[in-house]
Amino acid sequence: MRDLEILKSEYMEVKVCPQLGAGIFSMRYLLGAHWVDVMRPTPYEAVEKREPGALASFVMIPYSNRIENAVLKYRGNNYMLSKNTPEGHAIHGEVRSRPWRILQKEPGYIAMEFDSRDFEDISWPFPFYARIEYRVSGRVFLVRLALENTGDLIMPAGMGIHPYFMRKLTPEDNAVILKVPVKGVYPGDTPIPTGPWTDVPDELDFSQGKELDFRHIDKCYRVFNAPTLIKWPGSQVSLTMEADNIFKHIIIYSPKDSKDFFAVEPVSNCNNGFNMAEQGVEDTGTVYLQPGETFMGNITIKME
């Protein structure tokens, strides 16, 4: 597909789609003599129809996950955002369905940029500039995100990525083991938290590593700055994901009865974190960028 950029090493292949949010089209790993999909591959028609939710992984900027009722409450103001969930929330930022410009390409590497001022229909009250770099080297895939406040006012900011991982790499896999350095979990029966993070109940605790079953999970966790581990025992493959300390949260999303995929999302802010911070809730991961200020972070995925 001509719109894809291919990053490849002797062990990994990552296809990138600059025109659809700088998202990941596919990520494959050389297992023995065969390439296997580690992330859920994107249907070609999803790119043509501009459906970022079908990507193998997409970028979330200038906030991650949901803002309740699509209303950003900030410094005494209510900013109306576009509603893009069935429940009427705003979700996953403003960049995942829009084209990014390629800044630099070389073997195994690509850098892309996004300027909100290029789009009249951006549903965000503060102008911003974003940059992403992808690099594939050996068994390692590096993601580097940067977000700059290009306006004149202090801006609440957040970012992250939304990778979907395969439950099976090969037919030998009948289980996937997930270990996440969870510190706390946000309460509530929906993805909108009802309060600050609290202790993790045993059934939601992946800190020691356990099988990810087929029940529905859509939870935001406060995490320690430590690696996340995914294991496919049948294939004898493991994945280690490490994120810089700005990514203080991880979303675990496992659709009910899905036999194919799940998501583990390193993000800076918790769900509805900006509004919770406005209400006085601490430790939501909300970053306040001064005019001209940039914050950035790396996420590294290593296959073994």
Image (tube, grey):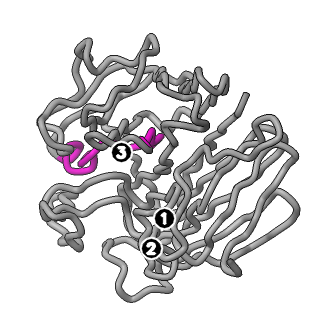
Residue 109 location (% of width, % of height): 80, 59
Residue 228 location (% of width, % of height): 53, 26
Q: Is residue 224 left or right of residue 258?
A: right
**Which region of the structure is painted magenta?**
261-278
Q: Are marks 3 and 2 in contact (CB under 8 Å)?
A: no
Q: In the picture shown, does residue 20 fall above or below 300?
A: below
Q: Is residue 276 magenta?
A: yes
The label shown at residue 290 is none
Q: Distance from label 1 to label 2 (Cα)? A: 20 Å
Label 2 crowding class (10 Å Cα cut-off): few <14, some 14-19, many 20+? many
The amino acid at mark 3 is Thr
Residue at which label 1 appears: 149
Which comes sooner in the sequence, label 3 or label 1?
Answer: 1
Secondary structure beneath disc 2?
Answer: loop
Q: Are marks 3 and 1 in contact (CB under 8 Å)?
A: no
Q: Is residue 86 left or right of residue 223?
A: left
The amino acid at mark 2 is Ser
| Residue 115 quadrant | bottom right
Label 1 crowding class (10 Å Cα cut-off): few <14, some 14-19, many 20+? many
Q: Distance from label 3 to label 1 (Cα)? A: 14 Å
Residue pictured at 24% horizontal, 63% vertical: 90
Which comes sooner in the sequence, label 3 or label 2?
Answer: 2
Q: In the picture shown, does residue 51 fall above or below 238?
A: below
The amino acid at mark 1 is Asn
Q: Residue reaching furthest bottom? A: 120
Residue at which label 3 appears: 286
Mark whose residue sits in front, 1 or 2: 2
Mark whose residue sits in front, 3 or 2: 2
Across the whole image, how many numbered discs are drawn on residues? Answer: 3
Residue at which label 2 appears: 97
